[in-house]
Structure formats: structure tokens, C-alpha cells
């Protein structure tokens, strides 16, 4: 059975991105989902001075271990002012100091959603551009606009076209996992 690491790239206790990452990860077949909360990985803000003085926090090593133990990663990004939430960016910065290949060559399913009509489009583009740089593993992406309108806790994605597109993307990611 394949292991999936899934999380919302946000530290909000009411994160719609955590909800969305959980939903998508559970659409995969024959997987064990390890859902994490970024609040459990809170570290000091990265700086070279901190790294030189105190080393890399144990929680950054723990994050890298979780990635290493997984066969694929599902991340749904919160968009803060067109970019990553600080909670995610800080974990990513620390983890990159351990190994520049933060995702360890695992297939990535990059998601974003937001209350608005763009669905986290800008952060998803930023993540896709950044993570595809010198990265050979498959990267699948999907953005869900207007989360409250297009998603329900009982039925998941409810808008038919978006639901069909997501199903296609899930199949592509599943194929990458099974390869």
C-alpha cells in the first residue's frame, strides 16, 4: 500500500486547504494517508544567523522524514497576498537547508483553493514553477475556486465540470504513484 503525505499549507485551525488536501488524498485508491498539521511543525523564522547559532531544528528533520517515508505528497496551498502562507514557507526554507530536494523526488499533487473565484491561482503557479525547477518527478495541479460554493463536506467537489477535471487529475496522480 502506498503512503501519501497530505497537508494544507496553512496554519489556520479552520483551513479550507487542509480540508481540500484531505478530501483529495482520500480519493486515491489503495493508499494510507498521513495527514499532518503545520502547527505541529512550528519553528523559529528561518535565518542563516539562527542556523549557524542553533543548527537546524529537529522539526525540520521530522518534516523531511515524513516526506522520505511517503510515496507521494498532496499539498493544498493557502494564498496569502499572492504567495505561500508564512507557516509553509518557513518549514520549506528550513527543510531545504537539510536537502535542496525537499520533496525527495516523490510525485506531487499541488492544489489550491480559496473563498474567491481565482482559487489560489497565483500561489499554485508559484509552487508549480518553483517545485518543477530541476525536479523530474511528476507534478499534478488543480485549483478549486470559490470553495464554499463548489465544495461540500458530504459530497466533496460539487460543481460538475470541476469534479470531472479533479477526477482526471486524481487518475493522473494515481498513475504516477503506481509507476
Image (cartoon, rainbow, N blue to C red):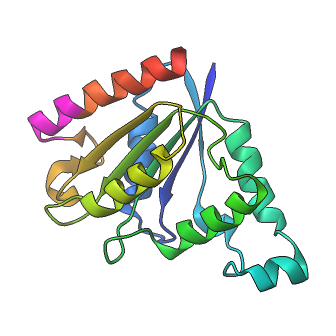
Within the image, what quadrant is residue 17 found in?
A: bottom left
Q: Nearer the viewer, residue 59 or 101?
A: 101
Within the image, what quadrant is residue 70 found in?
A: top right
Q: Position of residue 148 (x, y in %)?
A: 20, 59
Q: Is residue 14 magenta?
A: no
Q: Measuring 43% from the left and 47% from the top, which residue is drawn there?
A: 21
Quadrant where the image shows the N terminus = top right
Question: Image check: 166 left or right of 177?
Answer: left
Q: Main secondary structure of the magenta part?
A: helix
Q: Position of residue 175 (x, y in %)?
A: 44, 17
For the magenta stretch, what is the residue range?
158-165
Q: Measuring 77% from the left and 46% from the top, which residue is drawn there?
A: 65
Question: Image check: 117 left or right of 178?
Answer: left
Question: Image check: 85 left or right of 135?
Answer: left
Q: Nearer the viewer, residue 138 or 109?
A: 138
Image: 110 above or below 93? above
Q: Nearer the viewer, residue 87 or 157?
A: 87
Q: Measuring 48% from the left and 66% from the top, which residue is drawn there?
A: 10
Q: Position of residue 88 (x, y in %)?
A: 54, 66
Number of residue marks: 0
The residue furthest front is 134
Q: Is residue 160 magenta?
A: yes
Q: Position of residue 133 (x, y in %)?
A: 49, 47
Question: Image check: 169 left or right of 138?
Answer: left
Q: Measuring 67% from the left and 43% from the top, which residue is drawn there?
A: 67
Image: 68 above or below 64? above
Within the image, what quadrant is residue 34 found in?
A: top right
Amino acid at each position: 500500500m502506498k503512503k501519501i503525505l497530505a497537508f494544507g499549507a496553512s496554519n489556520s485551525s479552520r483551513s479550507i486547504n487542509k480540508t481540500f488536501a484531505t478530501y483529495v488524498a482520500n480519493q486515491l485508491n489503495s493508499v494510507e494517508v498521513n495527514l499532518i498539521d503545520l502547527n505541529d511543525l512550528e519553528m523559529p523564522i528561518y535565518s542563516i544567523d539562527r542556523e549557524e547559532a542553533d543548527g537546524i531544528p529537529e522539526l525540520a528533520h521530522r518534516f523531511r522524514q515524513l516526506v522520505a517515508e511517503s510515496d507521494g505528497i498532496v499539498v493544498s496551498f493557502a494564498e496569502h497576498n499572492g504567495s505561500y502562507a508564512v507557516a509553509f514557507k518557513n518549514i520549506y526554507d528550513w527543510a531545504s537547508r537539510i536537502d535542496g530536494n525537499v520533496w525527495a523526488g516523490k510525485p506531487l499533487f499541488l492544489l489550491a483553493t480559496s473563498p474567491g473565484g481565482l482559487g489560489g491561482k497565483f500561489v499554485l503557479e508559484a509552487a508549480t514553477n518553483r517545485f518543477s525547477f530541476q525536479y523530474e518527478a511528476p507534478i499534478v495541479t488543480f485549483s478549486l475556486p470559490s470553495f464554499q460554493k463548489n465544495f461540500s463536506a458530504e459530497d466533496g467537489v460539487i460543481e460538475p465540470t470541476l469534479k470531472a477535471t479533479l477526477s482526471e487529475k486524481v487518475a493522473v496522480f494515481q498513475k504516477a504513484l503506481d509507476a
